[in-house]
């Protein structure tokens, strides 16, 4: 059930009487009070779903107490997704899928009536403490705030630790009329008065069916139509090609993206990293090395770049040189998340590779120490524990 709040209406406030009627986007916002009479902003949760019966209830249970309205746009479910949605809201709408995520999300936003629009995917979850922090944010948020970003854990290791985190636009002021862009990997560009919060949402997939062809198909159709791809579309098309193992074509599109010289700094650095890995997979080690070095054009050293330079030397069995680069990566402090942050590069991987390098150099004490440090980054890690058993068998102090 949605949390109960007392509505405070002002003259001219818009009230949606028909759940099938799209709210007037220019309507005045509704303000609520908590039980102590403190005013707070209101939130419309806006979701697009299709065949999500396995996860939708989990998602809605985790977020419902923190929001004031739930909008569900269904793009063609054939399971019980809509029935589950109706347990939480009567604002469930159908949308004929047209291979355009931005279009579907814009429809969901158009039905919102509260102060702010918030989006989630059906396999997203707010842990109880994160939901409480969102509720607290509603009480303290300056209404002049146009956007609130939140952290997004999208990939996890076998122990459930997040290994890939990004920052996403998450809460958007409705009367700013923000619109989603791009048919796939859709986004709303950051603008206006932005609050960067550290509220965290977990993206926890239940389906593991391999890499979906859908996104790649959309990009291929866009390309074949003769459309001029934007720099962002080139970048994400390259990522899709990489994820499908099409490394030569992916490298081509990463290079085309970088050649535009119009990409966001974080995407440029990530593209250099991804390009290097594609080229390495193709056996082009020197071009891969050059791609890593080109990342320094865009910003200060990043752990993933330094670590991969370390791998370049490790692959030649130059363990002393590799150790220098792995150590440089290990010495870095993780930055505030803005683009994608590959957490394991910021501690665990450099230390576990330093362990390997020093073992091959013959410095077993340093090797064991770096294995210990890797374990501090990932407690209970199987590789660390196996290494420790190995060192113990050698009676290394």
Image: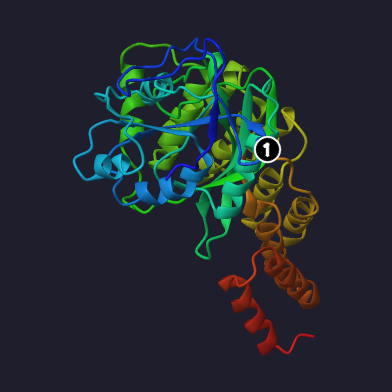
Q: Is residue 10 left or right of residue 249?
A: right
90, above or below 155, in the image: above
Q: Residue furthest left?
A: 78
Residue 394 vertical placement versus 181 (above, below): below
352 and 165: which is toward the camera? 165
* Image spot of residue 249 (x, y percent): 42, 31
Between 144 and 369, the one lying in front of the other is 144
Residue sitting at x 47%, y 12%: 25
Colour treatment of the image: rainbow
Say which residue label 1 marks: 197
Quarter of the image for the N terminus: give it. Answer: top left
The C terminus: image quadrant: bottom right
Locate residue 9, reporting x and y percent.
Answer: 54, 20
Q: Kindly indicate the quadrant of the structure image that contains residue 270.
A: top right
Element carrying mark 1: strand
Q: Quadrant of residue 183?
A: top left
């Amino acid at each position: 059930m949605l949390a109960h709040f007392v509505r405070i209406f002002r003259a001219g406030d818009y009230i949606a009487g028909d759940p099938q009627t799209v709210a007037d986007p220019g309507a005045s916002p509704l303000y609520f009070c908590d039980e102590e009479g403190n005013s707070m902003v209101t939130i419309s949760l806006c979701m697009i779903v299709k065949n999500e019966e396995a996860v939708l209830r989990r998602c809605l249970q985790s977020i419902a107490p923190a929001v004031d309205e739930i909008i569900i746009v269904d793009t063609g479910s054939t399971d019980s997704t809509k029935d589950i949605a109706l347990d939480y809201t009567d604002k469930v709408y159908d949308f004929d899928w047209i291979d355009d995520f931005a279009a579907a999300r814009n429809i969901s936003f158009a039905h919102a009536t509260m102060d702010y629009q918030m989006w989630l995917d059906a396999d997203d979850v707010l842990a109880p403490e994160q939901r409480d922090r969102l509720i607290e944010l509603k009480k303290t948020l300056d209404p002049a705030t146009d956007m609130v970003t939140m952290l997004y854990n999208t990939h996890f290791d076998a122990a459930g630790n997040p290994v890939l985190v990004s920052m996403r636009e998450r809460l958007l002021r409705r009367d700013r009329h923000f619109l989603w862009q791009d048919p796939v990997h859709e986004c709303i560009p950051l603008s206006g008065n932005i609050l960067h919060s550290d509220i965290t949402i977990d993206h926890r997939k239940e389906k593991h069916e391999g890499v979906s062809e859908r996104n790649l198909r959309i990009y291929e159709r866009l390309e074949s139509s003769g459309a001029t791809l934007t720099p962002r579309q080139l970048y994400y098309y390259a990522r899709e090609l990489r994820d499908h193992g099409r490394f030569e074509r992916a490298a081509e599109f990463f290079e085309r993206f970088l050649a535009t010289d119009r990409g966001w700094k974080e995407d440029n650095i990530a593209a250099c990293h991804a390009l290097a890995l594609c080229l390495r997979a193709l056996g082009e080690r020197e071009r891969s090395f050059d791609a890593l070095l080109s990342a320094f054009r865009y910003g200060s050293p990043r752990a993933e770049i330094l670590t991969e330079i370390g791998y370049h030397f490790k692959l030649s069995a130059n363990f002393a040189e590799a150790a220098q680069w792995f150590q440089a990566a290990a010495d870095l402090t993780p930055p505030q998340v803005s683009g994608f942050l590959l957490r394991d590069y910021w501690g665990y991987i450099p230390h576990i590779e330093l362990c390997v390098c020093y073992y091959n150099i013959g410095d077993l004490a340093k090797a064991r120490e770096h294995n210990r440090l890797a374990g501090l980054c990932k407690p209970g890690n199987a590789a660390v524990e196996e290494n420790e058993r190995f060192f113990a068998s050698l009676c290394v102090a």
